[in-house]
Amino acid sequence: MKYILGVDGGGTKTLAVCADINGSIFGVGMSGGSNYHTVGLEKAVDAIKQATDKANINKSKINVAYIGLAGAGREKDREILANAISDLDIADKVIVNHDAFIALAGATICKPGVIVIAGTGAMAFGINKFGKESRSNGWGNILGDEGSAYYIAQKALISACKAYDNRGMETNLLPAIKEYFKLDDFREIIYKVYSSSPQDIAKIAPLVSYAAESGDKVAVEILENAGYELALSAIAVIKNLGLSDEPVLVATAGSVFNAGKILIKSFEETLKLYNPNLEIISPKFKPVIGALLLALKEVGLEINDRILNRLKEGKVEDKIENI
């Protein structure tokens, strides 16, 4: 029997799943973050080792390991990581790619398409039937990430400041943000914001959804703009891949797509106006399963319904929650 390994390494956690080539999952492991740009190369490699050791509970010889990592978007990054990971002797063959690649593979079951990922940051990534890749956005909170939770939160903070100064529209975001930060004087917001990380700022985003649900015009406009920007990211990838007039799958992933109907409507209407033939879908599988599917392809197997059903029966989500 041949065995495969899929790894999804992010900024805060690393997930690993071991399975046989029939799709039967026998181990799941989790460890800390493995984005080497933020935790360093040594810690990133150690996190990958810990997660894979926990997942390979039978200590089986892994034939192919497919590893998708945040921070591996450039070829140079992948070379650095692949060289460092090779010393771990995880598998006979180890492939390192970026996290969006495995996210798309899981979302579409390795079919061509586009995925829009919007959490703290935001980006779009796609592949066409010829294997050409394209990505858009994802430049970070200073240069881009329009449509992300950080973007939504930043717009909310700016709007609250404008309302406080009486140079902008009144908005319920002002008292909501004041309460969120437990401020006696709203002007103290400066100390809170400028000492916070982008991840902390992004946590304010749900306040915009709550305000929008109550009809706050400023909050509604922020969410509409966020949906529009996320659609623009997807459209850029669609253009770059020559899919403007063709049927194309567009998957959505990340916490921002839980922001409510206002953002979703703006996103979908903008996309459909550009290309009426596209289909917006929810991911079929998590990115770590996308890595497993890619490993299966490397072994030379065709992904069929039998394998997919066994992967579903593996209930990886439940096993991750129980770790």
Image (spheres, helix red, strand yellow):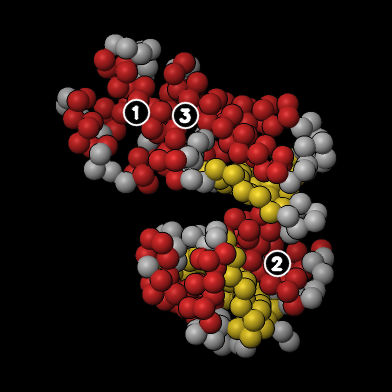
Q: How many marks?
A: 3
If you read the primary sequence from the N terminus, does the residue marked by circle 1 or circle 2 appear first?
Answer: 1
Q: Which residue is mark 1?
A: 157
Question: Which quadrant, please, contains the N terminus?
Answer: bottom right
Mark 1: few, some, or many residues within 10 Å (few <14, many ≥20)?
many
Q: Is residue 37 above or below residue 271?
A: below
Residue flagged by tag 1: what amino acid is it? Leu
Which residue extends farthest front? 76
Q: Is label 1 in a helix, a strand or a loop?
A: helix
Answer left or right for 193 relative to 172: left
Q: Is label 3 in a helix, a strand or a loop?
A: helix
Q: Nearer the viewer, residue 18 or 44?
A: 44
Answer left or right for 188 relative to 148: left
Q: Quadrant of residue 293?
A: bottom right
Q: Quadrant of residue 298?
A: bottom right
Residue at (62, 73) in percent of width and height: 95
Question: Residue 315 appears at what percent x and percent y?
Answer: 62, 63
Residue at (50, 84) in percent of width and height: 88
Q: Mark 1–mark 2 contact, CB under 8 Å?
A: no
Residue flagged by tag 3: what amino acid is it? Ser
Q: Which residue is mark 3?
A: 209
On residue 200, the disc is none
Closer mark to the observer between disc 3 and disc 1: 1
Alpha-carbon distance for marks 3 and 1? 14 Å
Question: Residue 144 appears at what percent x and percent y?
Answer: 47, 39
If you read the primary sequence from the N terminus, does the residue marked by circle 2 or circle 3 appear first?
Answer: 3
Q: Is residue 133 above or below residue 202?
A: below
Q: Is residue 272 above or below residue 94?
A: above
Answer left or right for 14 relative to 195: right
On residue 293, the disc is 2
Q: Is residue 123 above or below residue 177?
A: below
Residue flagged by tag 2: what amino acid is it? Leu
